[in-house]
Image (cartoon, rainbow, N blue to C red):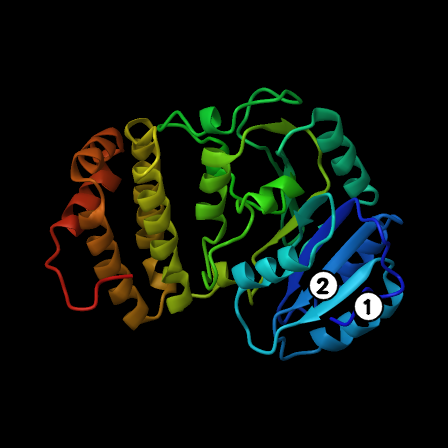
Amino acid sequence: MKGIPPNVPDVVKLSVIVPFYNVQQYAPDTLRSLKANAREDFEFILVDDCSRDGTPEILARAERELPGAVLVRHEQNGGLATARNTGIDTARGEYLTFLDGDDWLAPGYFSQLVGAIEELGVDFIRTDHVQCTARARQVQRVPVGRRGQVLSPREAILPADRSTSVDYAFAWAGAYHRRLVDRGLLHFTDGLRTAEDRPWIWKLHREAESFAAVSLLGVFYRRGVASSLTQIGDVRQLDFIRAFDQVIAETAKDRDADALLPKAVRTYCAIISHHLGSIERFEPAVAKKLKSLSAAALRRMPQDVLDDALDSMDLQRATKLRRLRRRPATAGAAA
Protein backbone atom coordinates (compact mmCIF):
# COMPACT_ATOMS: atom_id res chain seq x y z
CA MET A 1 0.00 0.00 0.00
CA LYS A 2 1.58 3.31 -1.11
CA GLY A 3 0.63 6.04 1.34
CA ILE A 4 -2.91 6.83 2.46
CA PRO A 5 -5.50 6.78 -0.34
CA PRO A 6 -7.20 10.15 -0.93
CA ASN A 7 -10.61 8.89 0.22
CA VAL A 8 -9.31 7.78 3.66
CA PRO A 9 -9.46 10.19 6.65
CA ASP A 10 -6.33 11.49 8.40
CA VAL A 11 -7.80 10.76 11.84
CA VAL A 12 -9.53 7.39 12.08
CA LYS A 13 -12.04 6.54 14.79
CA LEU A 14 -12.86 3.00 13.60
CA SER A 15 -10.92 0.56 11.42
CA VAL A 16 -13.04 -2.24 9.93
CA ILE A 17 -10.99 -5.27 8.79
CA VAL A 18 -12.65 -7.34 6.07
CA PRO A 19 -10.83 -10.37 4.58
CA PHE A 20 -12.09 -11.64 1.21
CA TYR A 21 -11.31 -14.96 -0.45
CA ASN A 22 -13.22 -16.21 -3.51
CA VAL A 23 -16.52 -14.61 -2.49
CA GLN A 24 -17.54 -12.92 -5.74
CA GLN A 25 -21.15 -14.04 -5.19
CA TYR A 26 -21.42 -12.30 -1.81
CA ALA A 27 -18.86 -9.47 -1.86
CA PRO A 28 -21.21 -6.93 -3.52
CA ASP A 29 -23.72 -7.29 -0.65
CA THR A 30 -20.92 -6.96 1.90
CA LEU A 31 -19.54 -3.84 0.23
CA ARG A 32 -22.97 -2.21 -0.14
CA SER A 33 -23.52 -2.70 3.59
CA LEU A 34 -20.13 -1.11 4.32
CA LYS A 35 -21.10 1.90 2.21
CA ALA A 36 -24.30 2.19 4.29
CA ASN A 37 -22.03 2.37 7.36
CA ALA A 38 -19.45 4.83 6.01
CA ARG A 39 -18.50 7.84 8.11
CA GLU A 40 -15.82 10.45 7.52
CA ASP A 41 -13.69 9.05 10.35
CA PHE A 42 -14.08 5.33 9.45
CA GLU A 43 -11.72 3.27 7.31
CA PHE A 44 -12.50 -0.07 5.66
CA ILE A 45 -9.46 -2.31 5.22
CA LEU A 46 -10.29 -4.77 2.44
CA VAL A 47 -7.82 -7.68 2.47
CA ASP A 48 -7.86 -9.79 -0.69
CA ASP A 49 -6.36 -13.11 0.42
CA CYS A 50 -5.18 -14.03 -3.09
CA SER A 51 -8.66 -14.69 -4.53
CA ARG A 52 -8.83 -16.64 -7.80
CA ASP A 53 -12.34 -15.71 -8.91
CA GLY A 54 -13.88 -12.30 -9.70
CA THR A 55 -13.34 -10.93 -6.18
CA PRO A 56 -10.20 -8.84 -7.02
CA GLU A 57 -12.09 -6.88 -9.71
CA ILE A 58 -14.99 -6.24 -7.32
CA LEU A 59 -12.56 -4.96 -4.67
CA ALA A 60 -10.67 -2.78 -7.15
CA ARG A 61 -13.95 -1.03 -7.92
CA ALA A 62 -14.73 -0.72 -4.21
CA GLU A 63 -11.34 0.92 -3.61
CA ARG A 64 -12.47 3.75 -5.90
CA GLU A 65 -16.10 3.98 -4.84
CA LEU A 66 -16.29 3.11 -1.12
CA PRO A 67 -15.45 6.05 1.17
CA GLY A 68 -12.59 5.10 3.49
CA ALA A 69 -11.59 1.98 1.54
CA VAL A 70 -8.01 0.72 1.84
CA LEU A 71 -7.24 -2.30 -0.38
CA VAL A 72 -4.46 -4.72 0.59
CA ARG A 73 -3.61 -7.77 -1.52
CA HIS A 74 -1.87 -10.98 -0.48
CA GLU A 75 0.40 -12.59 -3.06
CA GLN A 76 -0.29 -15.98 -1.46
CA ASN A 77 -3.38 -17.29 0.30
CA GLY A 78 -2.70 -17.28 4.03
CA GLY A 79 -6.12 -18.00 5.52
CA LEU A 80 -8.47 -15.94 7.65
CA ALA A 81 -6.21 -15.52 10.68
CA THR A 82 -3.31 -14.22 8.60
CA ALA A 83 -5.59 -11.93 6.57
CA ARG A 84 -7.01 -10.43 9.76
CA ASN A 85 -3.48 -9.85 11.06
CA THR A 86 -2.63 -7.98 7.86
CA GLY A 87 -5.65 -5.79 8.51
CA ILE A 88 -4.68 -5.18 12.14
CA ASP A 89 -1.17 -4.16 11.07
CA THR A 90 -2.63 -1.75 8.52
CA ALA A 91 -5.32 -0.27 10.78
CA ARG A 92 -4.98 3.26 12.15
CA GLY A 93 -8.23 3.51 14.10
CA GLU A 94 -8.74 4.19 17.80
CA TYR A 95 -11.09 1.21 17.68
CA LEU A 96 -11.02 -1.90 15.49
CA THR A 97 -13.64 -4.38 14.39
CA PHE A 98 -13.98 -7.19 11.86
CA LEU A 99 -16.37 -8.42 9.19
CA ASP A 100 -16.10 -11.49 6.95
CA GLY A 101 -16.28 -11.00 3.19
CA ASP A 102 -19.52 -12.98 2.81
CA ASP A 103 -21.47 -11.34 5.67
CA TRP A 104 -23.27 -8.00 5.83
CA LEU A 105 -24.43 -5.21 8.16
CA ALA A 106 -27.48 -3.17 9.02
CA PRO A 107 -27.17 0.50 7.94
CA GLY A 108 -25.60 2.72 10.60
CA TYR A 109 -24.57 -0.21 12.79
CA PHE A 110 -20.93 0.80 13.17
CA SER A 111 -21.81 4.24 14.51
CA GLN A 112 -23.89 2.55 17.22
CA LEU A 113 -21.01 0.16 17.93
CA VAL A 114 -18.52 2.99 18.40
CA GLY A 115 -21.00 4.90 20.55
CA ALA A 116 -21.42 1.87 22.83
CA ILE A 117 -17.71 1.20 23.41
CA GLU A 118 -16.94 4.90 23.91
CA GLU A 119 -19.74 5.26 26.47
CA LEU A 120 -18.59 2.21 28.46
CA GLY A 121 -14.84 2.91 28.18
CA VAL A 122 -13.94 -0.80 28.12
CA ASP A 123 -11.17 -2.72 26.34
CA PHE A 124 -13.74 -4.52 24.19
CA ILE A 125 -17.47 -5.07 23.73
CA ARG A 126 -19.38 -8.10 22.49
CA THR A 127 -22.62 -7.91 20.51
CA ASP A 128 -25.43 -10.22 19.44
CA HIS A 129 -25.81 -11.16 15.76
CA VAL A 130 -28.26 -12.59 13.25
CA GLN A 131 -27.45 -16.04 11.85
CA CYS A 132 -28.67 -16.46 8.28
CA THR A 133 -29.09 -19.91 6.73
CA ALA A 134 -30.70 -19.61 3.29
CA ARG A 135 -33.82 -17.54 4.07
CA ALA A 136 -34.01 -18.46 7.75
CA ARG A 137 -32.99 -15.87 10.34
CA GLN A 138 -32.11 -16.57 13.97
CA VAL A 139 -30.82 -14.15 16.61
CA GLN A 140 -27.73 -15.42 18.45
CA ARG A 141 -27.07 -13.78 21.82
CA VAL A 142 -23.80 -13.27 23.65
CA PRO A 143 -23.97 -15.70 26.60
CA VAL A 144 -23.55 -12.89 29.14
CA GLY A 145 -26.56 -12.01 31.26
CA ARG A 146 -25.58 -8.52 32.40
CA ARG A 147 -25.83 -6.05 29.55
CA GLY A 148 -24.31 -2.59 29.25
CA GLN A 149 -22.17 -3.02 32.39
CA VAL A 150 -18.39 -3.00 32.77
CA LEU A 151 -17.34 -6.58 33.57
CA SER A 152 -14.15 -8.55 34.22
CA PRO A 153 -13.25 -10.65 31.14
CA ARG A 154 -11.51 -13.24 33.31
CA GLU A 155 -14.57 -13.76 35.50
CA ALA A 156 -16.73 -14.32 32.39
CA ILE A 157 -14.81 -17.48 31.37
CA LEU A 158 -16.58 -19.70 33.93
CA PRO A 159 -18.58 -21.74 34.84
CA ALA A 160 -17.11 -24.77 33.11
CA ASP A 161 -20.43 -26.54 32.54
CA ARG A 162 -22.29 -23.66 30.86
CA SER A 163 -21.87 -21.71 27.65
CA THR A 164 -19.95 -18.51 28.44
CA SER A 165 -18.39 -15.60 26.60
CA VAL A 166 -15.32 -17.63 25.50
CA ASP A 167 -17.67 -19.99 23.64
CA TYR A 168 -19.01 -17.05 21.63
CA ALA A 169 -15.79 -16.68 19.67
CA PHE A 170 -16.94 -14.57 16.68
CA ALA A 171 -14.35 -11.81 16.19
CA TRP A 172 -16.80 -9.69 14.17
CA ALA A 173 -19.34 -9.62 17.03
CA GLY A 174 -17.80 -6.69 18.85
CA ALA A 175 -15.30 -3.82 18.86
CA TYR A 176 -11.82 -3.53 20.34
CA HIS A 177 -9.78 -0.61 21.67
CA ARG A 178 -6.37 0.00 20.09
CA ARG A 179 -4.67 -0.54 23.44
CA LEU A 180 -5.33 -4.28 22.92
CA VAL A 181 -3.19 -4.14 19.77
CA ASP A 182 -0.47 -2.31 21.69
CA ARG A 183 -0.55 -5.03 24.37
CA GLY A 184 -0.28 -7.83 21.79
CA LEU A 185 -3.75 -9.20 22.51
CA LEU A 186 -5.61 -8.66 19.24
CA HIS A 187 -3.54 -10.61 16.71
CA PHE A 188 -4.52 -14.13 15.69
CA THR A 189 -2.29 -17.21 15.43
CA ASP A 190 -0.86 -17.01 11.92
CA GLY A 191 -1.75 -19.86 9.59
CA LEU A 192 -4.70 -21.32 11.53
CA ARG A 193 -7.27 -22.29 8.90
CA THR A 194 -10.16 -22.91 11.26
CA ALA A 195 -11.02 -22.25 14.95
CA GLU A 196 -8.72 -19.21 14.72
CA ASP A 197 -11.11 -17.30 17.00
CA ARG A 198 -10.71 -19.77 19.89
CA PRO A 199 -7.15 -19.04 21.17
CA TRP A 200 -7.86 -15.39 20.39
CA ILE A 201 -11.03 -15.11 22.53
CA TRP A 202 -9.44 -17.03 25.41
CA LYS A 203 -6.40 -14.73 25.37
CA LEU A 204 -8.66 -11.67 25.38
CA HIS A 205 -10.62 -12.95 28.35
CA ARG A 206 -7.54 -13.98 30.32
CA GLU A 207 -5.51 -10.82 29.73
CA ALA A 208 -7.75 -7.84 28.91
CA GLU A 209 -8.93 -5.73 31.85
CA SER A 210 -12.54 -4.87 31.02
CA PHE A 211 -15.36 -5.72 28.64
CA ALA A 212 -19.11 -5.43 28.24
CA ALA A 213 -21.91 -7.21 26.40
CA VAL A 214 -24.35 -4.90 24.62
CA SER A 215 -27.71 -5.62 23.01
CA LEU A 216 -26.85 -4.40 19.52
CA LEU A 217 -28.04 -6.30 16.45
CA GLY A 218 -26.40 -5.36 13.17
CA VAL A 219 -24.18 -8.17 11.88
CA PHE A 220 -25.77 -10.73 9.56
CA TYR A 221 -23.70 -13.93 9.57
CA ARG A 222 -24.15 -16.11 6.51
CA ARG A 223 -24.13 -19.85 7.33
CA GLY A 224 -23.91 -22.69 4.84
CA VAL A 225 -21.69 -20.93 2.29
CA ALA A 226 -20.27 -23.68 0.06
CA SER A 227 -16.75 -22.18 0.03
CA SER A 228 -16.63 -21.76 3.81
CA LEU A 229 -14.23 -24.03 5.66
CA THR A 230 -17.04 -25.05 8.00
CA GLN A 231 -18.65 -26.70 4.94
CA ILE A 232 -15.51 -28.34 3.55
CA GLY A 233 -14.36 -31.69 4.95
CA ASP A 234 -10.69 -31.40 4.06
CA VAL A 235 -7.58 -31.45 6.20
CA ARG A 236 -7.76 -27.72 6.99
CA GLN A 237 -10.69 -28.49 9.30
CA LEU A 238 -8.27 -30.32 11.58
CA ASP A 239 -6.58 -27.06 12.56
CA PHE A 240 -9.06 -27.00 15.45
CA ILE A 241 -6.62 -29.40 17.15
CA ARG A 242 -3.78 -26.88 16.94
CA ALA A 243 -6.12 -24.10 18.04
CA PHE A 244 -7.31 -25.91 21.16
CA ASP A 245 -3.84 -27.25 21.98
CA GLN A 246 -2.85 -23.58 22.13
CA VAL A 247 -5.80 -22.77 24.42
CA ILE A 248 -4.83 -25.61 26.78
CA ALA A 249 -1.10 -24.75 26.79
CA GLU A 250 -1.64 -21.04 27.45
CA THR A 251 -4.34 -21.61 30.05
CA ALA A 252 -2.11 -24.13 31.87
CA LYS A 253 0.40 -21.30 32.44
CA ASP A 254 -2.23 -18.93 33.78
CA ARG A 255 -2.24 -17.93 37.45
CA ASP A 256 -5.76 -19.35 37.72
CA ALA A 257 -4.99 -22.54 35.77
CA ASP A 258 -6.63 -24.82 38.34
CA ALA A 259 -9.93 -22.96 37.97
CA LEU A 260 -9.81 -22.34 34.20
CA LEU A 261 -8.43 -25.60 32.81
CA PRO A 262 -11.64 -27.60 33.44
CA LYS A 263 -13.50 -25.17 31.16
CA ALA A 264 -10.82 -25.36 28.44
CA VAL A 265 -10.64 -29.17 28.57
CA ARG A 266 -14.40 -29.63 28.59
CA THR A 267 -14.78 -27.30 25.58
CA TYR A 268 -12.02 -29.13 23.70
CA CYS A 269 -13.78 -32.45 24.37
CA ALA A 270 -17.09 -31.03 23.16
CA ILE A 271 -15.50 -29.85 19.90
CA ILE A 272 -13.82 -33.22 19.30
CA SER A 273 -17.16 -34.93 19.94
CA HIS A 274 -18.90 -32.54 17.53
CA HIS A 275 -16.46 -33.35 14.71
CA LEU A 276 -16.68 -37.08 15.36
CA GLY A 277 -20.46 -36.82 15.26
CA SER A 278 -20.33 -35.49 11.69
CA ILE A 279 -17.34 -37.52 10.52
CA GLU A 280 -19.12 -38.62 7.35
CA ARG A 281 -18.60 -35.16 5.82
CA PHE A 282 -14.83 -35.66 5.86
CA GLU A 283 -12.84 -37.30 3.09
CA PRO A 284 -11.91 -40.87 4.22
CA ALA A 285 -8.21 -40.11 4.76
CA VAL A 286 -9.11 -36.96 6.72
CA ALA A 287 -11.66 -38.86 8.84
CA LYS A 288 -8.95 -41.37 9.78
CA LYS A 289 -6.57 -38.53 10.64
CA LEU A 290 -9.29 -36.82 12.70
CA LYS A 291 -9.58 -39.92 14.89
CA SER A 292 -5.83 -40.36 15.38
CA LEU A 293 -5.20 -36.65 16.07
CA SER A 294 -8.15 -36.48 18.47
CA ALA A 295 -6.95 -39.55 20.36
CA ALA A 296 -3.48 -38.02 20.70
CA ALA A 297 -5.02 -34.73 21.83
CA LEU A 298 -7.00 -36.47 24.57
CA ARG A 299 -3.82 -38.13 25.83
CA ARG A 300 -2.02 -34.75 25.88
CA MET A 301 -4.62 -33.11 28.09
CA PRO A 302 -4.13 -33.01 31.88
CA GLN A 303 -5.51 -36.47 32.62
CA ASP A 304 -7.05 -35.69 36.00
CA VAL A 305 -8.86 -32.69 34.52
CA LEU A 306 -9.94 -34.80 31.54
CA ASP A 307 -11.34 -37.51 33.83
CA ASP A 308 -13.45 -34.93 35.65
CA ALA A 309 -14.63 -33.43 32.35
CA LEU A 310 -15.68 -36.83 30.99
CA ASP A 311 -17.48 -37.66 34.24
CA SER A 312 -19.53 -34.48 33.84
CA MET A 313 -20.55 -35.15 30.22
CA ASP A 314 -23.50 -37.19 29.01
CA LEU A 315 -22.86 -40.93 28.85
CA GLN A 316 -22.89 -41.26 25.05
CA ARG A 317 -20.29 -38.57 24.41
CA ALA A 318 -18.15 -39.58 27.38
CA THR A 319 -18.10 -43.24 26.30
CA LYS A 320 -17.08 -42.33 22.76
CA LEU A 321 -14.24 -40.09 24.00
CA ARG A 322 -12.99 -42.67 26.54
CA ARG A 323 -12.89 -45.29 23.81
CA LEU A 324 -10.99 -42.87 21.56
CA ARG A 325 -8.47 -42.10 24.32
CA ARG A 326 -7.66 -45.84 24.53
CA ARG A 327 -7.07 -46.00 20.76
CA PRO A 328 -3.48 -47.16 20.03
CA ALA A 329 -1.11 -44.34 19.14
CA THR A 330 -0.08 -44.07 15.50
CA ALA A 331 2.92 -42.41 13.91
CA GLY A 332 2.36 -38.79 12.98
CA ALA A 333 -0.54 -38.24 15.37
CA ALA A 334 0.72 -34.84 16.44
CA ALA A 335 -1.14 -31.77 15.28
- State whether residue 178 is above or below residue 149: below
Q: CA distance from mark 1 to mark 2?
A: 8 Å
Q: Is disc 2 placed on a helix, strand or loop?
A: strand
Q: Residue 251: image x %, image y %? A: 35, 39
Q: Is disc 1 placed on a helix, strand or loop?
A: helix
Q: Is residue 32 left or right of residue 263?
A: right
The structure residue drawn at horizontal position 68% and vertical position 46%, both measured from the top left corner, is 96
Q: Residue 259: image x %, image y %? A: 32, 26
Quadrant for the N terminus, please.
Answer: bottom right
Q: Residues within 10 Å of mark 1 (few under 14, many from 20)?
A: many
Instruction: Name the residue that disc number 2 marks.
Output: 46
Q: Is residue 185 left or right of residue 12?
A: left
The three-letter code of the residue at mark 2 reads Leu
Pointer 1 with pointer 2, Cβ within 8 A: yes
Q: Earlier in the sequence, mark 1 or mark 2?
A: 2
Q: Which mark is residue 323?
A: none
Q: Residue 29: image x %, image y %? A: 77, 59
Q: Is residue 221 left or right of residue 280?
A: right
Instruction: Name the residue that disc number 1 marks.
Output: 63
Examine the image and state in which quarter residue 20 appears.
bottom right
The structure residue drawn at horizontal position 25% and vertical position 59%, both measured from the top left corner, is 293
Examine the image and state in which quarter residue 76 appears.
bottom right
- State whether residue 236 is above or below residue 274: below
The structure residue drawn at horizontal position 66% and vertical position 78%, both measured from the top left corner, is 53
In this view of the protein, which residue sits in the foreground, 7 or 317?
7
Q: Is residue 81 visible?
A: yes
Quadrant for the C terminus, please.
Answer: bottom left
The three-letter code of the residue at mark 1 reads Glu
